[in-house]
Amino acid sequence: MIITLPQANIEYPEKTADSELLLIGGGRPPARQWLQAAAAGRPIWCIDHGIDACRSAGLRPARLIGDSDSAQPEAWKWGESLGIPIDRFAPEKDLTDTQLALRKIKAGGCNAFLLLTGALGGRFDHALSTVYSLLGSGLSGCLADEQETLFYLRAGETLSLEAKKLPKAISLLPLGADCQGVTIRGVHWPLTDAALQQDWPYAISNELTAPDRRLQVTLASGGLGAYLCWE
């Protein structure tokens, strides 16, 4: 399965998903043009404040989820005026709006690859919760905007990426205690069958050096985040 982003093409295992879904969250708003390009051909779900970015970019969401505590009132009203399904929750709840969206997607049996934007930047606690919530959900997806992208690998998976724009840095983030058999190719500091420690992550700030701008990462066991950032 090939996922197309404005800055890269990413090849995931064929078993990953059979469709794609764009989730717009409430963190740092993505750039308008990037969001419009990322939304092409993908159904959109807005998570609370994500409705502001959606409205600003002139995009029509298919669903709105959240407690409306961070969305601008006029943007939320705009969402209501569209006649789309809205799942509104009380602010006093245990789960985050993003977790509620992930739970609804999984409960519905959706086998879509989730492109979650508006997840990075802003509050660190929300970003960290989202990073682990998507991994723990068992759903396939990545966190992305025009500045940063985090791709997930689970045991036995290989990710191949072709950069349209040269990234500033590439880092491998172990997302569990057992992160074994890590191999990365196409970079200045390659790894072969390495073990990465969650409490001492060192595979940080690598550089893409392959002439064809192709990167490949393989994981034998555990959970791994492949992080790229752009200027």
Image (cartoon, rainbow, N blue to C red):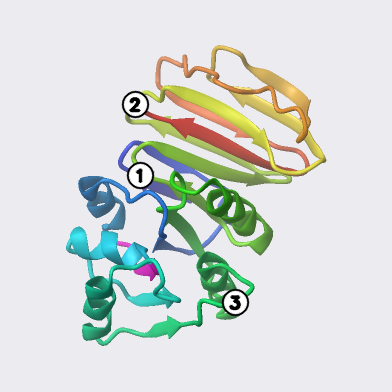
The residue under the point 51% across, 82% down is 90
Q: How many marks?
A: 3
45 within the magenta span:
yes
Q: What stretch of residues is rendered in magenta?
A: 41-48
- Of 5 and 231, the residue lying toward us: 231
- Residue lying farthest to the right in this orientation: 178
- Disc assigned to residue 93: 3
Q: Is residue 185 above or below residue 116?
A: above
Query: Which labelled disc corresponds to residue 228?
Result: none
Mark 3 vs mark 1, CA separation in Å: 34 Å
Residue that numbered label 2 is attached to: 231
Residue at point 65%, 63% (across, down): 137
What amino acid does circle 3 point to? Answer: Lys
Q: Quadrant of residue 47?
A: bottom left
Earlier-in-chain disc, 1 versus 2: 1
Q: Nearer the viewer, mark 2 or mark 3?
A: 3
- Please determine whether, in this image, residue 167 is positioned above or below residue 53: above
Q: Quadrant of the C terminus?
A: top left
Residue at image point 46% right, 52% down: 119
Q: At label 1, which amino acid type do we have?
A: Leu
User: Quadrant of the rendered structure where residue 58 is?
Assistant: bottom left
Q: Which residue shows up at 35% across the image and 63% down it?
A: 50
**Residue 110 versus residue 56: which sits nearer the camera?**
56
216 within the magenta span: no
User: Which label sits on residue 5?
Assistant: 1
Q: Are marks 1 and 2 in contact (CB under 8 Å)?
A: no
Give the Cα distance between marks 2 and 3: 37 Å
Q: Of the residues under marks 3 and 1, which one precedes in the sequence? A: 1
Which sits earlier in the primary sequence, circle 2 or circle 3? 3
Q: Secondary structure at mark 2?
A: loop
